[in-house]
Amino acid sequence: MTSLPARVVFVAGLSGSGKTTAMAALEDLSFYCVDNLPPALIGQFLDLCAKSTPPIRKIALAIDTRESAFLQALPTVVRELRGGGTDLELLFLDASNAALVNRYRETRRVHPLSPSGSVEEGIEAERQLLTELSGLADFVIDTTPLNVHQLREAVVRYVVGGARPTVVNLTSFGFRFAPPSSAELLFDVRFLPNPHFDPNLRDRTGQDPEVAEYVLKNERAAALMTRLRDLLGFLLPLYDVEGKAYVTVGVGCTGGRHRSVAIVDTLARELRADGREVNVSHRDVEKSS
């Protein structure tokens, strides 16, 4: 086998303990996530990841308990990979029987190990199957008192040693072409001076310094920027604490070429200056206004 990826995280635990939430948190941390890979294929899969171009350096594998034969082989796989030098960590999620029963009742699902019996019987059978694997865990999270946001934060803190700040996606757009469906915060800046009515600026975009100055050098724009900075300054730290991976902010004007572009670029510069990771998209800037 060739050199293995830098880091491999196995996510195991009782059904209903939060494995889906944990895997989503790892995916947001740029881990390549795979569910329910048979143990016999794990070594081959890691080898393929090492040989890919570029090599995949962060991998998360979710362990399923529905196939007991597969599950029984996993402790051996874990020991062999660790013995071969793989940086493998086993994150185990646990919860009280009462909490698990309540979660199954809320979702009205059957337990995978007791499809025709009681949830309680399935939980006990699963605990027995997971005894050896849980003993190999590097870190155990009791999810009994945690909501999904707290579980995400716990996973992130374990993996990276602290919560990853929320990424800000800034999108300019034109209301003429409809607001972006992905926007969680939406701002209408059509009250600002419109460069479209200046023949010297009409064919340019908000990325042009003269257009940006036309949009921003007035009392309305100054007041808007102050309030946007204050609002995001209030919200983003709260999103960080919650473990929110990203927030998408849409800023719209009529055609999406002038005012919204200038505002988005200005916001992006200021947020980046504060150390925030920002992605910028000017959706409609090339469309005819």
Image: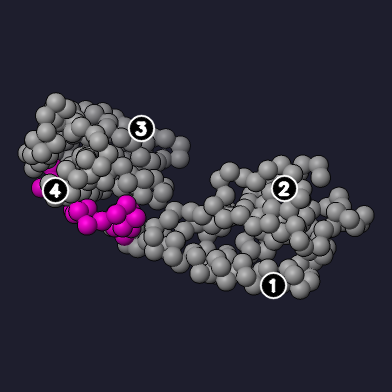
Q: Which SS class for mark 4?
A: helix
According to the image, label 2 marks what residue?
A: 174
Tell me the CA gap for discs 4 and 1: 53 Å
Measured along the vertical axis of the image, is residue 220 above or below residue 179? below
Q: Identify which amino acid the numbered label 1 is placed on.
A: Ala
The magenta span reads 133-157
In the image, residue 226 lies in the stretch drawn in magenta: no
In the image, 30 versus 261, the foreground residue is: 261
Q: Are marks 2 and 1 in contact (CB under 8 Å)?
A: no
According to the image, label 3 marks what residue?
A: 48
Tell me the CA gap for discs 4 and 3: 41 Å
Viewer-nearest of discs 4 and 2: 4
Q: Are marks 4 and 3 in contact (CB under 8 Å)?
A: no
Q: Is residue 230 left or right of residue 47?
A: right
Tell me the CA gap for discs 3 and 2: 44 Å
Q: Residues within 10 Å of mark 4 (few under 14, many from 20)?
A: few
Q: Is residue 88 left or right of residue 215?
A: left
Name the residue: 34% across, 55% down. 149
According to the image, label 4 marks what residue?
A: 98
Name the residue: 43% across, 56% down. 244
Q: Residues within 10 Å of mark 3 (few under 14, many from 20)?
A: some
Mark with earlier residue (3, 2): 3
Furthest residue toward right: 199
**Label ID, residue 223:** 1
Q: Which SS class for mark 1?
A: helix
Q: Identify which amino acid the numbered label 2 is placed on.
A: Gly
The answer, for residue 77, to whether it is visible in the render is: yes
Q: Identify which amino acid the numbered label 3 is placed on.
A: Leu
In the image, residue 134 lies in the stretch drawn in magenta: yes
Dividing the image into 4 quarters, which one contains the C terminus? top right
- Identify the image quadrant of residue 242: bottom left
